[in-house]
């Protein structure tokens, strides 16, 4: 089973089935790496699939923003979830420029309102 994201990337759910769950109700299952770090059948449901779509789309937006930042000469030293950590020499670029670059919607998400916030500091800290 594949879910095609707005970016064109596809999420894959291997060998999907509809089968009775522990409550004897129909459930969607697929093969994947479970909590024991081995291949097993994993049960899922609609809201979980929606969560996967939302998180994967957010990842695609961040990945494209990171490419644009790199093309403009910004050195990304780390990223986590919805943030990038950039190290720059004094005098190179501005926080506004970084925020503006990150707020550009890709062609596959034209019209999507995006905004980026940030701060400058001498060392990494969680805002």
Image (cartoon, rainbow, N blue to C red):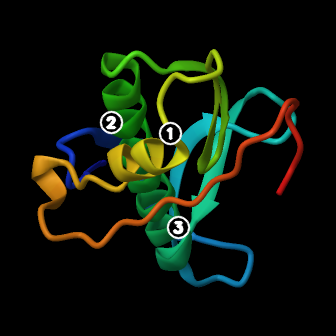
Q: CA distance from mark 1 to mark 2?
A: 19 Å
Residue lying at the far front of the rendered structure: 91
Q: Which mark is residue 51?
A: 3
The quarter of the picture where residue 21 lies is bottom right
Please tell me whether mark 2 sits on a helix, a strand or a loop: helix
Which of discs 1 and 3 lies nearer the camera? The answer is 1
Q: Is residue 105 left or right of residue 115?
A: left
The residue to which callout 1 is attached is 94
- Closest to the observer, 100 or 21: 100
Above or below, 45 against 55 in this view is below
The residue lying at 63 percent from left, 15 percent from top is 89
Vertical side of 1 occupied by 38: above or below: above
- Crowding at label 2, few (<14), some or many (≥20) Cα neighbours within 10 Å? some
User: Regarding mark 1 in the picture, which secondary structure is present there?
Assistant: loop
Closer to the chain start, of discs 1 and 2, is 2
Asked if 120 appears above or below 20 in the picture, the reply is: above
């Amino acid at each position: 089973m594949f879910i095609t994201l707005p970016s064109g990337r596809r999420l894959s759910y291997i060998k999907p089935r509809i089968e009775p769950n522990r409550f004897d109700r129909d459930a969607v299952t697929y093969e994947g790496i479970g909590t024991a770090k081995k291949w097993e059948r994993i049960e899922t449901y609609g809201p979980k699939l929606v969560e996967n779509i939302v998180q994967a789309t957010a990842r695609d937006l961040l990945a494209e923003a990171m490419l644009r930042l790199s093309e403009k000469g910004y050195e990304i030293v780390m990223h986590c979830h919805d943030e990038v950590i950039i190290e720059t020499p004094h005098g190179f670029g501005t926080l506004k420029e970084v925020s503006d670059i990150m707020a550009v919607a890709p062609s596959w998400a034209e019209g999507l309102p995006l905004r980026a916030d940030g701060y400058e500091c001498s060392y990494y800290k969680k805002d």
